[in-house]
């Protein structure tokens, strides 16, 4: 008989153990070793559960054991010390409080998923893990962040394999009362409700708000399972990335609009500072901008003015390197949601325009969430240097007329939260390092890399731990596939503590190429079974439930790994989660990554492995393209110019086999050094720890967000909230900027470059100055409204300017008849060879974040002039 409802009965703690409740409810335990060690003392025989889910552990402890602990003076002393340590962590000034340039009152960070700990299964892959690491690092640094997401009753699916190796999904239900969460209540003790109008105000979606305390950072999770909703709407937050198009749209409306309302309620109840900055982590939460515009409309602003205020304080991060990965909804579906909605000042036409694909090749029938995110944010970034470049090219159509390099999308390379992912044994290498914060110190990594002999010893310890965990999971998987214990004796011999171990774990879309290693099964088998230099591979990953292609790839790999001759050297471990990820990145010697370049946005798993003393073997994509230096691992050559996909896979797979067989394995097994250690291998490990340790950290990443994006966004937002340059009322800056943009946009068609002339009688040798004059018709605009530049540099074969430099020209007279204004300036000549220049006109205003913001630019109708030949 099946229960119609599930809930959790919590144990009653003796008075002396009451501080355990606060320690368990603050998820700092998930990365604080001292707190986890304390939990381990509660039930030493169940230490693994204590480290992964202390609340679940406590539910299994008999009352007699709790009474015994309440009378144990040593345990109580440790409990008191842990409680005091947490209190100090939550209240003491940290990096953010010590930096006067950190000006944001608070930052609201929106993401559809969060990977904080396996005990809170609200993540599917890299986006969620990155979001979790972002919150943890912000907490460690004292950044006043508020996280916002959805509480999925079934989380993401758990994965198991059929006898034939086909992925099957289960969606186990969870009770929020059994998770490390508290329900947000108002001053009267009533549960807070937020709501979102649907179907043009014809329906209403209500949600309650659960709070996960991630160190100093509150994470607000909206839950639609409330009695006010009908059966269908209760299921809006049933599962992560589940359901059809309507269901997904409802989730994103709740995340964005309901999320802003949850933030307002939380701040009003707790006194937390209101956010100055809203950070949209991918387009799923893009509707938050509409709610913020509504808020400003209700304060008396017009749409354009409200839009400017929203944009000034919004940061948008794209993680998607391919258009197919972006959420796009039918335009009429979005129109139906907002037609006749809550706010008359926000017409549906303006909403639809925000998500319209107005660029060449765009689909007029869709509403693009990433496009809306970019139009509602003044600051946009990718998640690695290469991904920033890919994103500028992918979205360049939103800024026509600008070179791809000038598209206003920057990048902040992802990082990982070291205290979460680095093994305690690695931390112990730096004997004088105490606590998680020390991993943020570059000197920590110098100390960790100081003793190669100890590194080699601990690598075997971590490898052996992975082997043990892999055997346990493999046995459980085969039992689920229908095998009996008598058939599984061979699992005791799977993998080897002393064999070179390669890890490969990620989601399984086609571009990540899970099965590239199988391209030539004979060559792979030879590497696995080499008598002198064997290799073993541990693989994990989930395909999206609707992705039969990805499931087929998993089945291919599982069938290969099932073969009796190789199954002791290659394993596929189902149900990839944070616990398995920790074992993999800590235990493998080499981290393999072979995506189709340049489709890996960042790929932080390799960073985690590197921080544990592993080496990377990867296509030059994502973060590896940026930080590979020839000594911290290996780069798989990429056949970028080969148009045939099968041929490209063949070439890159062959390069992979060559690298493993001729470079990686020989170096690992060259144990001719002192004590039988592989000296050259360890030299690379030491180099990797020293070089990547300080750079691969989420703390570095969050600092860059604070200084490069959050603080400037907060400053811009405040600049628009104060009276404008001509004085006036609140939001004068926004009114001034919106009016200026409207005037300039309307007048821009009349702007033209009338004449360009360059002096050809000066010094035209390298380093000389080329004087340039331009006459520009401004129509109804004034010289203060524009910036006129000479753009110059080496000229390519098609007269394109390569690596252009820009210099603003100064006024030289006017305006004359027709509003023509003269300008003059000079371009510095470079190396001998072809040289080119042109003139361009851009809008300019003190409140613009950058010249490309309006997407307006004017060039001469024809090339203004070209200086070719030998410049002496």
Image: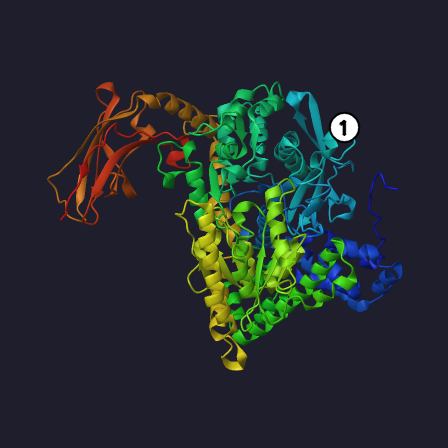
Q: Residue 597, position in %: x, y?
A: 46, 49
- Would residue 697 be visible to someone looking at this image? no
* Viewer-proximal residue among 217 and 558: 558
* Viewer-proximal residue among 683 and 589: 589
Image quadrant in which you'd find residue 525: bottom right
Outermost residue on the bottom side: it is: 674
Q: Residue 256, position in %: x, y?
A: 61, 34
* Viewer-proximal residue among 198 and 585: 585
Q: Residue at x 54, y 46 (%)?
A: 510
Image quadrant in which you'd find residue 500: bottom right
Q: Is residue 348 above or below residue 251?
A: above
Q: Is residue 69 above or below residue 699?
A: below
Is 423 on the left or on the right of 80, as rendered? left
Badge 1 element = loop
Circle 1 is placed at which residue position? Answer: 230
Is 170 on the left or on the right of 363, as rendered? right
Badge 1: residue crowd in 10 Å (few <14, some 14–19, many ≥20): some
Q: Residue 53, position in %: x, y?
A: 74, 55
Image quadrant in which you'd find residue 724: top left
- Would residue 299 be visible to someone looking at this image? yes
Name the colouring of the figure: rainbow
Q: Residue 477, position in %: x, y?
A: 72, 56
Q: Residue at x 60, y 19 (%)?
A: 339
Locate the N terminus by quadrant: top right
Outermost residue on the left side: it is: 761
Is 102 on the left or on the right of 871, as rendered? right
What is the count of numbered marks?
1
């Amino acid at each position: 008989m099946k229960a119609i409802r599930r809930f959790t009965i919590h144990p009653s703690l003796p008075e002396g153990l009451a501080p355990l409740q606060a320690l368990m409810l603050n998820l700092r335990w998930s990365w604080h070793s001292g707190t986890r060690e304390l939990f381990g003392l509660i039930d030493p025989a169940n230490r693994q559960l204590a480290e992964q889910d202390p609340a679940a552990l406590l539910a299994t402890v008999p009352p007699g054991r709790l009474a015994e602990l309440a009378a144990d003076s040593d345990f109580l002393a440790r409990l008191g010390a842990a409680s005091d340590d947490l209190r100090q962590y939550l209240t003491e000034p940290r990096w953010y409080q010590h930096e006067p340039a950190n000006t944001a009152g608070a930052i609201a960070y929106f993401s559809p998923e969060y990977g904080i700990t396996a005990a809170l299964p609200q993540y599917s892959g890299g986006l969620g893990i990155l979001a979790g690491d972002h919150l943890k690092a912000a907490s460690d640094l004292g950044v006043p962040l508020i996280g916002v997401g959805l509480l999925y009753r079934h989380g993401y699916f758990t994965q198991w394999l059929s006898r034939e190796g086909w992925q099957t999904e289960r969606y186990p239900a969870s009770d929020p009362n059994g998770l490390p969460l508290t329900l947000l209540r108002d001053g009267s003790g009533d549960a807070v409700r937020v709501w979102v109008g649907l179907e043009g105000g014809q329906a209403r979606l209500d949600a309650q708000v659960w709070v996960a305390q991630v160190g100093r950072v509150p994470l607000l999770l909206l839950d639609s399972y409330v009695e006010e909703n009908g059966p269908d709407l209760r299921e809006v937050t049933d599962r992560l990335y589940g359901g059809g198009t309507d269901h997904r749209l409802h989730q994103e409306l709740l995340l964005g609009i309901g999320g802003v309302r949850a933030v307002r309620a939380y701040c009003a109840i707790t006194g937390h500072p209101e956010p100055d900055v809203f950070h949209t982590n991918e387009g799923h939460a893009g509707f938050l901008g509409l709610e913020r515009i509504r808020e400003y409309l209700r304060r008396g602003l017009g749409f354009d003015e409200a839009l400017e205020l929203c944009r000034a304080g919004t940061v948008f991060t794209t993680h998607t390197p391919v258009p197919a990965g972006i959420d796009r909804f039918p335009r009429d579906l979005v129109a139906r949601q907002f037609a006749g909605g809550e706010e008359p000042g926000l017409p549906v036409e303006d909403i639809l325009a925000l998500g319209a694909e107005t660029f060449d090749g765009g689909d007029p029938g869709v509403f693009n969430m990433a496009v809306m995110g970019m139009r509602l944010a003044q600051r946009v970034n990718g998640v690695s240097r290469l991904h920033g470049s890919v994103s500028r090219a992918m979205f360049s159509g939103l800024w026509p007329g600008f070179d791809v390099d000038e598209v206003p999308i920057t990048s902040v390379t992802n990082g990982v939260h070291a205290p979460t992912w680095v093994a305690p044994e690695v931390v112990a290498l730096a004997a004088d390092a105490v606590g998680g914060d020390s991993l943020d110190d570059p000197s920590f990594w110098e100390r960790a890399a100081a003793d190669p002999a100890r590194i080699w010893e601990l690598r075997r310890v971590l490898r052996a731990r992975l082997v043990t965990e892999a055997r346990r999971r493999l046995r459980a998987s085969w039992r689920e596939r229908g095998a009996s214990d008598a058939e599984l004796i061979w699992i005791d011999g799977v993998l080897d503590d002393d064999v070179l171990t390669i890890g490969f774990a990620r989601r399984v879309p086609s571009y990540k190429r899970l099965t590239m290693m199988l391209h030539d099964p004979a060559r792979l088998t030879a590497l696995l079974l080499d008598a002198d230099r064997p290799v073993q591979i541990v693989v994990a990953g989930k395909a999206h439930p609707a992705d039969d292609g990805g499931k087929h790839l998993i089945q291919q790999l599982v069938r290969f790994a099932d073969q009796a001759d190789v199954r002791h050297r290659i394993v596929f471990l189902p149900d990839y989660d944070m616990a398995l990820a920790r074992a993999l990145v800590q235990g493998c010697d080499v981290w393999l990554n072979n995506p189709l370049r340049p489709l890996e946005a960042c790929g932080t798993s390799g960073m985690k492995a590197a921080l544990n003393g592993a080496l990377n073997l990867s296509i030059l994509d994502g973060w590896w393209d940026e930080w590979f230096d020839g000594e911290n691992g290996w780069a798989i050559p990429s056949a970028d110019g080969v148009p045939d996909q099968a041929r490209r896979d063949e070439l890159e797979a062959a390069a992979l086999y060559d690298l493993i067989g001729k470079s990686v394995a020989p170096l690992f097994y060259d144990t001719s050094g002192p004590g039988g250690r592989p000296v050259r291998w360890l030299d690379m490990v030491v180099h990797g720890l020293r070089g990547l340790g300080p750079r691969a950290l989420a703390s570095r990443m969050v600092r860059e967000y604070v200084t490069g994006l959050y603080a400037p966004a907060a400053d811009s937002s405040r600049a628009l909230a104060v009276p404008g340059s001509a004085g006036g009322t609140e939001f004068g800056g926004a009114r001034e900027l919106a009016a200026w943009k409207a005037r300039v946009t309307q007048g821009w068609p009349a702007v033209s470059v009338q004449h360009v002339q360059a002096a050809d009688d000066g010094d035209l040798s390298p380093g000389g100055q080329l004087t340039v004059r331009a006459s520009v018709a401004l129509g109804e605009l004034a010289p203060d409204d524009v910036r006129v530049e000479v753009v110059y540099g080496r000229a390519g074969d098609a007269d394109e300017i390569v690596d252009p430099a820009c210099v603003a020209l100064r006024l030289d007279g006017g305006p004359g008849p027709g509003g023509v204004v003269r300008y003059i300036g000079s371009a510095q000549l470079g190396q001998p060879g072809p040289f080119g220049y042109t003139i361009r006109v851009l809008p300019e205003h003190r409140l613009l974040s950058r010249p490309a913001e309006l997407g307006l630019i004017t060039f001469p109708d024809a090339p203004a002039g070209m200086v070719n030949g030998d410049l002496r």
